[in-house]
Image (tube, grey):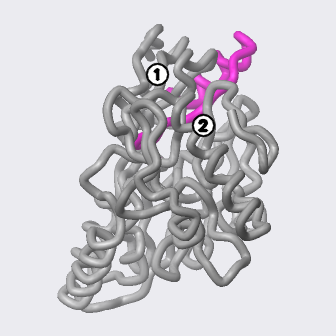
Amino acid sequence: MKIEEGVSLARLTTVGIGGPARHFARPATLSELEEALRWAAGEGLGVFTIGLGSNLLIADEGVEALVLRLEGELAKVEAEGELLVAGGGAANAVGLHRARAAGLGGFEFACAIPGTIGGGVRMNAGAYGGDWKQILVRALVVSARGSEWRTPRELGLEYRQSDLGPAEVVAGVELRLAPHPPQEIKRVVAELQTQRKAAQPTNKRTFGSVFKNPDHELSAGRMLEACGLKGHRIGGAQISPRHGNFIENAGEGRAAEALALMAEARRRALEEFGVELEREVKFVGGLDLPPAGQTL
C-alpha cells in the first residue's frame, strides 16, 4: 500500500481549510488498513480518518500524523435482509440509496449528514430526531492491536460522541433497518432535504454544525443569532448569515480565523445566556479553544 507525503487536506474537507498531512494513505481492504495502522504505530505517529471531510477543522500548519481515507472494499454498502452492511468509508448518501432500493427505512435522517457511515459511528451523528445509536447493531473497530466488533454500548455512544480512541478506525458497520416502501422513503428524504436547504447554508463551504445544542430552550444556532453574530466575519471566515451555528469559508479562510469566530461565539453565549457552548466539530492538528469567556 502506497503512503504519500505532504498531501493537501484543504481540498479533501467540506470547508476547504487545512494544511498538509505528513503521511496519507488510502487503504482499500481490511488487511491494508491493519498494515497502515501497524506502520503508524511503529513510527510513533498519530492516526486520523478524514472520511468525506465534514465535521473537521484542520490546522493551517497541517497534521503530523498518518491521515487515512478508506476506499474500495472499505467503502462498499450492501443490504442483507434487514441489515445495511457497510464499510466505514461508505458515504451516507450511498447507504441511503442502497437502503431505499432494498425497501429499508430508518436511515432517512442521514440525508442531512454529508459524511461517512463510519464517521457517523465515531460521533454518533444524528439529525431530525434520528442518530446512529438507534440503528447500529455493531461496528468493526481496527487498531494496531487488531480488529474487534463492538456494540453501541461497548462503543459508548452518547449525544454526538463515542468512546473510540484516536488511533481506532471504524472499518465496518451493520445497521438494522425496517421494511418500508421505497416511494415513502423518497418522499421523507425530499421533505428533510427541503427543510435543510431552507435553514442551512448548503451551497457554502462549511464543516457542518459548529457547536452541540446546549441544554437550553434555545438551540446553539438560535442563541448565536440572538447574540447578533449571524454574518460576523473575521478574515476569510464568517458565521453564516443563514444559520448561526455554521461557519462559512467566505474566501481564503484559515483555521485560525474560524477558531477566533468560535471563541467569540462562546464568549457571547456565556456573557448573554450563561451557557458554555461545547464544540461539535472535531479539531485536527493541535487546535484548541481558550476557556469560555475568552477570545483569541
Magenta stretch: give its range: 31-54
Residue occupying image coordinates x 41% and y 61% = 113
Q: Secondary structure at mark 2?
A: helix
* Residue 244 seen from this side: yes
Q: Is residue 174 left or right of residue 90?
A: right
Q: Quadrant of residue 16?
A: top left
Q: Amino acid at mark 1?
A: Ala
Where residue 194 appears, as percent x and y from the top left, is 24, 76
Residue occupying image coordinates x 46% and y 48% = 232
Quadrant where the C terminus is found in the figure: top right
Q: Is residue 179 left or right of residue 176?
A: left
Which numbered marker is on residue 133?
none
Q: Is residue 292 above or below residue 59?
A: below
Residue occupying image coordinates x 66% and y 84% = 217
Q: Which residue is mark 2?
A: 260
Q: Quadrant of residue 72?
A: top left
Residue neighbourhood size for the residue with mark 1, other residues' Cα within 10 Å, grouped as few (<14), some (14–19), many (≥20): many
Q: Is residue 295 above or below residue 123?
A: above
Which residue is at the front of the view, 237 or 144? 237
Q: Is residue 217 magenta?
A: no
Q: Which residue is mark 1?
A: 25
Question: In this view, which residue lies farthest toward the left?
Answer: 183
Q: Amino acid at mark 2?
A: Ala
Q: Is residue 53 magenta?
A: yes
Where residue 45 appears, as percent x and y from the top left, is 69, 17
Residue occupying image coordinates x 28% and y 73% = 198
